[in-house]
Image (tube, rainbow, N blue to C red):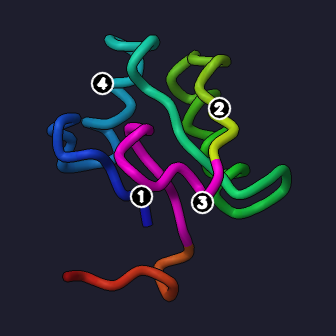
């Protein structure tokens, strides 16, 4: 599951990749560490969008709205 910041406006993965291609300085992700699900998903998104500077080393997997997206296995996400 990909979770994006509301300001991104992406409704689909295709939308997010288009956003990342058009806004490479704004498209980034946070992860709890190298090799984590979030890290690997983020690197895949970076590869798809051509944004090799997307990674952000942030505590708490980028909590606090400091990244444009985060990825997690769908079983660990819940709607609120």
Q: Residues within 10 Å of mark 3 (few under 14, many from 20)?
A: few
Q: Residue at x 51, y 84 (%)?
A: 76
Rounded to the nearest whole Å, what is the CA distance between mark 3 and mark 2? 14 Å
Q: Residues within 10 Å of mark 4 (few under 14, many from 20)?
A: some
Element class at badge 4:
helix
Tell us which disc is closer to us: 1 or 3: 3
- Are the residues flagged by discs 1 and 4 in contact, CB closer than 8 Å? no
Q: Which residue is mark 1?
A: 2
Q: Position of residue 58 (x, y in %)?
A: 63, 44
Q: Which residue is mark 2?
A: 55
Rounded to the nearest whole Å, what is the CA distance between mark 1 and mark 3? 16 Å
Tell us which disc is closer to us: 4 or 3: 3
Region in magenta: 59-72
The quarter of the rendered structure image containing the N terminus is bottom left
Q: Which residue is mark 4?
A: 19
**Mark found first going from the N terminus, 1 or 3:** 1
Quarter occupied by residue 68: top left
Q: Residue at x 65, y 52 (%)?
A: 59
């Amino acid at each position: 599951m990909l979770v994006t910041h509301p300001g991104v406006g992406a409704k689909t993965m295709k939308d997010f990749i288009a956003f990342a291609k058009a806004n490479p300085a704004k498209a980034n992700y946070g992860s709890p560490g190298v090799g984590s699900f979030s890290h690997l998903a983020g690197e895949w998104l970076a590869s798809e969008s051509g944004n090799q500077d997307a990674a952000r080393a942030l505590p708490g997997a980028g909590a606090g709205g400091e990244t444009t997206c985060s990825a997690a296995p769908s079983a660990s996400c819940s709607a609120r």
